[in-house]
Amino acid sequence: MRAIVSVVALAACAPVSERAPTAELAASRAPLAMCDLLGDTVSGVSFSDEEATNTLDFVNGATPAELDAVYGIGAAIAGNLVASRPFADLTDLDAVAYIGPSVLTSLRDETESAWCALDDGRQSCCIDLACAGLGDTRSGVDFTDAEAQAVLDWANRATTDELMAVCQVGPVIADAIESARPLPSLVALDLVPFVSGFHLEEMRGTESSTCPLQGSVLDEWCATDSAHCVCE
């Protein structure tokens, strides 16, 4: 089983040939105090700490065939990835030839199913996309853990058009949200310029929505294939 922590130290991720047997994996992981915050935005693609850690574990430990199977990679890019290992952070990954926004997005979105879900002993740094403790009350608006997960997933990963699909989020607020990424918590989202309690309430969803043609994050974002709105 994978450890559920907020972040996992990349230093604990040894090359696949050096990793401990499955029974020793838990003991080989670094304590939380040593963990790095790996979330970042590279080439316009935003990664949460969990997504970044999982993606780096994948590209550092997967076989060429497993990398090749990711949408947009192919044999040539898979070979470039293998030749460029190890990757310490997303900036290292982004520097690999032919890695761009499309491939980064595929890696971010497919790593959980293509790598972490295998849970076959090679995943020394995969962590669950958990959301316990994300819930909060900001600017008078109450969020459950699940609501916070959905809104933060949208705020960190949606495109400009997907941001503006939500009620009362226009181009100015969408640009401010994108400029502030990554947003690890509701506190950070509440501090984004032009975002008020009124906007947070529309993001979360309200029975008295002011938009007849637009909905909340749950309505507009969570139904898309890119969304990771469900707490695991």
Image: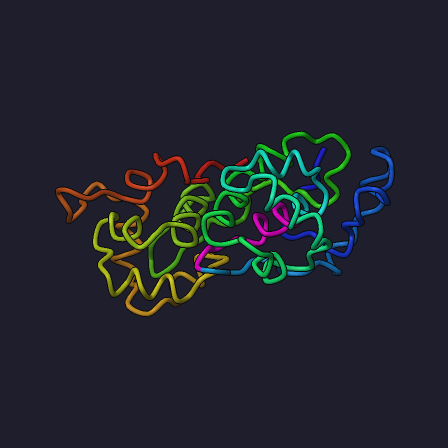
Task: Name the one closer to the observer, 167 or 64.
Answer: 64
> The C terminus appears in which quarter of the rendering?
top right
Among all residues in the image, which is located at the extreme left?
212
Among all residues in the image, which is located at the extreme bottom?
193
Task: Name the one closer to the observer, 71 or 203.
Answer: 71
Residue 25, placed above or below residue 96: above
Taken as a whole, is the magenta stretch helix, strand or loop?
Answer: helix
Q: Position of residue 203 (x, y in %)?
A: 30, 49
The scheme the figure's colours follow is rainbow
Q: Quadrant of residue 74?
A: top right
**Residue depicted at x 33% and y 66%:** 176
Magenta segment includes 227: no
Residue 231, placed above or below residue 141: above
Magenta segment includes 50: yes
Relative to residue 120, is residue 24 drawn left or right? right
Q: Position of residue 23 (x, y in %)?
A: 85, 33
**Residue depicted at x 26% and y 50%:** 202
Residue 89, placed above or below residue 225: below
How many numbered tags mark residues here? 0
Q: Position of residue 63 (x, y in %)?
A: 71, 37
> The N terminus appears in which quarter of the rendering?
top right
Q: Quadrant of residue 221?
A: top left
Q: Position of residue 92 (x, y in %)?
A: 63, 61
Residue 133, placed above or below residue 188: above
**Residue depicted at x 28% and y 51%:** 201
Q: Please report the bounds of the magenta region as a residue range.
A: 44-56
**Residue depicted at x 69% and y 52%:** 8
